[in-house]
Image (spheres, rainbow, N blue to C red):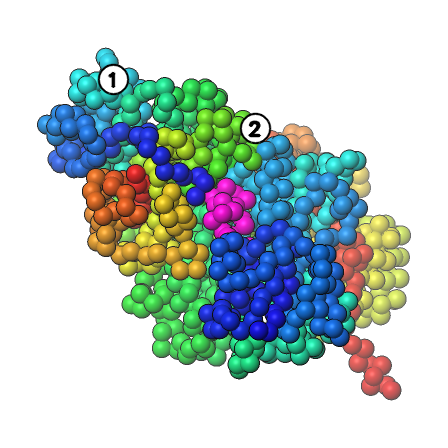
Amino acid sequence: MEALIETDVRTFIEVTEYWVPEGDTLVLAGGNYGDLKAFEEASRQTSFAKGEGLPGKAWAEARPVVLKGFDGSYFKRTEAAHEAGLTSAVAIPVFDGETLKSVLVVLCGDDDVRTGAIEVWKADDTLLRLDDGYYGAAKHFEFVSKHTQFPRGQGLPGGVWAAKTPILMRDLGSGYAFIRSESAGKAGLTTGLGLPIPVPGGDTFVLTLLSARGTPIARRFEIWDARAAKVGKANDAVLIDGICAREGRLWDDESPRKVSAWQGLIGRVLGTGLPVVEQTEGLAAGYDSVVALPIHSNGELAHIVAWYA
Amino acid sequence: MKKLVVIGAGMASGRVLEHLFDADPDAYEVTLFNAEPRGNYNRIMLSPVLSGEKTYQEIVTHDDDWYRENKVTCRFGEAVTGIDRDRKVVKGANGEVAYDKLVIATGSAPFIIPVPGKDLPGVISYRDLDDTNAMIEACGKRGNAVVIGGGLLGLEAAAGLALRGMNVTVLHLMGHLMDRQLDPAAGYLLRKDLERRGITVKTQASTKAILGEEAVEGVLLDDGEVLPADLVVMAVGIRPETRLANDAHIEVNRGIDVNAQMVTSDPDIFAVGECLEFNGMLFGLVAPLYDQAKVVAAGLLDQPGEFVPKELSTKLKVTGCDLFSAGDFADGENREDIVFRDPARGVYKRLVIEDNKLVGAVMYGDTADGNWFFGLIKDGTDIDEMRETLIFGPSMQGGASVDPLSAVAALPPEAEICGCNGVCKSTIVSAIQGGATDLGAIKATTKASASCGTCTGLVEQLMEVTLGDSYAAPEATSICGCTDLSHEDVRLLIKSKELKSQAAVWQELGWKTPNGCHVCRPAVNYYLLADWPVEYQDDPQSRFINERKHANIQKDGTFSVVPRMFGGMTTPDELRAIADAADKYKVPTVHVTGGQRIDLLGVKGEDLPAIWADLNAAGMVSGHAYAKGLRTVKTCVGKDHCRFGTQDSTGLGIKLEKKLWGSWSPHKVKLAVSGCPRNCAEATCKDIGVVCVDSGYQIGVAGAAGMDVKETERLADVTTEQDAIDLATAFMQLYRENAKYLDRPYKWVAKVGLDWVKERIVDDLDERAALIERFELSQSIYRKDPWAEEAKSKADQYAPLADLTLEAAE
């Protein structure tokens, strides 16, 4: 698989955690902190009221939030983050209609090497504009992205917006009518996962995770379709797309993989409607960490995106 | 070991080799030619490669290792130049190869429409990886792409190009996209989905030429429109690639002729895939190709096998477009439709049943049960016992009902519900949520439904949607069994949801039938042409016979022809022309009507175009005596001749009729202008009646003199002729825009109230001007003589199917 290559370099995202509401408070429900035990411990001792800290802000404002630089901000775990070398974070709320199911938070550390992009795009009537994004060392790409807008149906963000479904694109760096594509190619960004982030109110958000070969966000991506319109009412999901550095293509046009609720970790997402974030052995293709994120839409769990490292 | 040569490394021949090697890997020494410089890949996944959602590596079916392991001698990138059947050798560009058995799998070639400019650089067909890569490269240069062909391949190309950032227009010759696989309703939803991706779709678009000097620069359509283009993709169809077989004198019809064992006219030569023809059929989808491959592999091993074509199903590979189609879904006398629509989710399902068997299925937006339906079609299952719940699929045999509120629930918050007071859905919903839980409270808090009241049904449905079962809306009378919505609801929803085609109305308003019925179609056709005169094209098939024939059918099957006499005035020349026509066409009855014109009764259907042509030649146009539209403007002779006349009543009548003729309305509209209050033109019982007085003009509306008799109500008194014309025109347009189909003006005014009408066209001068402007826009389309157009273009439709009189005489 050319788009995804195994390397020894640490991945772009250092920490992933998810928070779930318990009454008026968000409490930690799971996470992958790698070796950053102190930060994990600090997180376990923390909870967030609505509007408080980064997860609480995503809940209160019902929108994905990008935070670059913790000093002097509303971020609550600044000291622990500093010690862990974490400098930026993105909070992604998971709503089912009006109800918050959870908030997924990814945290990254700056250096001159790690390249990637986590972007939040927001739609107005006719165009998607960059709301905010974290790019690591991809400074030129960041600059170009800030000046790029996508109409419906064009590019990864516009495609997700129009299709209302997650999309996984393979080679972002060539063959596109966007200047951003040339810049992506220069930054080494190859694989892009775009997903709709439904929120209460009328706003449209699209999240994109752009992965570089050298410092990938993940080495395996999967998109599962769980809509009743696709799989019936049995609470199943079918794998509609996926690539893996170790196993190549994961999709099968003729007989796609299918899981039912509670079958494996994708089945657990189907069963609970909540994300799964784990660091464990025995995952697909021998990976040891996974994030599986549900997308609720039109009153049902519509899709699940998963990434492994 | 016997020698097998295969020409073409496509999906069909690849599957032949898989079966062959599985069954007996040592049966043949295999040589595989391919004109492309690569082996077998999953061609039907090229569209995701084009869109960037797959890589070529992911769609490779047989890689180098596979060919090596199976000891296949690959001659990729080498064209085969001929087959010598006598010597049993295949001639390649790099030398000959002997065969014991030969498989021709040359596939198909794209059909290129023979228009000027088809060979310009930048014009690409869409068949293989090279075409795909050429398109991807073109995207890097940015610009406009035109895709010719709105079938599967063309639409997949369009979506891929759009995703890569091109501005894409799809041209399709037929009336709806994928017309071979979808019915118009599903085609409508597909079009909507593609347009949501920023793709421009033009149906009934015929390409006249591809323009450009050095490279493609544009596409010229038959209607004269020029579309700028940096890339043109031809995806109008394929034809079997038979040149090698032809040259080798193997029997070829449209494709290489084979029997059920896939053997050609030469017993040592098989054909497989898109290059062949079997029982007059050609094959383009992969499922039958794989069936053929099994048969070929069996034949190569001297085992029995027989190819039996099966029903096919279709899916489109555009991410986010969920469609499924299988079987036959054409209309038929013994066929019954089951339709399910969910406008909120953009879902349409239609099942076609014949003799208790499912024969066709079209689905859009929800395809979960597609394969189950496909199985029922293939197996010919008797569905009689599950007919009631069939549409809900295998898991819903208990059945769920279509939600009649879904169309209202699907309205966006900004959709205007009450046009009178400009109140949108979100305002009403907020009021309901704020405690306004009955109609009176809604009227008081928002003013919605407080004026003409035609939006009452919608407001009540909004209360039902918002409050759930705690609110029970009074039952409204629906148009017909095709829908639960009333005329008023449909009119308002056509406006607020900007529905501009019948397909859009059926889908977005959750019609229960595929195309409406004889009751709702004329109404919907009228509402659409009244609200969207420019965008909507009048559908003659949705009109009653009189309007289709532009004449009134009589009880003996003949027709009556009434030429228009503006203001009831005529001339000796016109009268001579009418008399000549009556003589020439042996018209048995000539009658002077109450609307001051002459009716020629007893005209044969086949004579209509000719009699119209003769009357047109004398300067006369249709009197629309058959129309739900303006009929006549009756006048008295006015002050020029009558000693009591106060104004030029005939002059005003002529001006009014010239202004209003040709316009369609919910029901017929009759006018009159009397020159004085003695009212010789009987203006006080017309839909619009003007009575001239010394001080000006008294405008009355909403009179009747038919089943009901009613005097007009005074709309206004005005002093100038122009004001009289403006008021009449504005009233006509207000009636056209708001009344229920088949309500005469007096019935409509009784519902909305004369005060409501006055507020809009007497008191509000801006609104009056806007109404007149909209009327004129509509008249720019419809103020045309239908006789002239029909006489020119459709004369053959009026001719009898056979001349039975002549046959009888012989």
Q: Which mark is residue B765?
A: 2
Is B639 displayed left or right of B233 in the figure? Answer: right
Q: Specify whether residue A57 is in view.
A: yes
Q: Amino acid at mark 1?
A: Phe
Q: Where is residue A38 shown, x and y percent of the image?
A: 14, 25
Residue at 61% of width from left, 37% of height from top?
Answer: B137
Q: CA distance from mark 2 to mark 1?
A: 61 Å
Q: Which mark is residue A70?
A: 1
Residue B470's place in the image compared with A67, above or below, is below
Q: Residue B48: say if magenta.
A: yes
Please name whichever residue, B539 or B653, is drawn nearer the observer in this view of the structure. B539
Please name whichever residue, B466 or A157, is drawn nearer the observer in this view of the structure. A157
Can you name the residue that lies furthest to the top here? A72
Can you name the residue that lies furthest to the front here? B1
Residue B484's place in the image compared with A77, above or below, is below
Occupied quadrant, residue A252: bottom left
Residue at 68% of width from left, 69% of height from top?
Answer: B98
Q: Residue B264: say if magenta.
A: no
Magenta span: B42-60
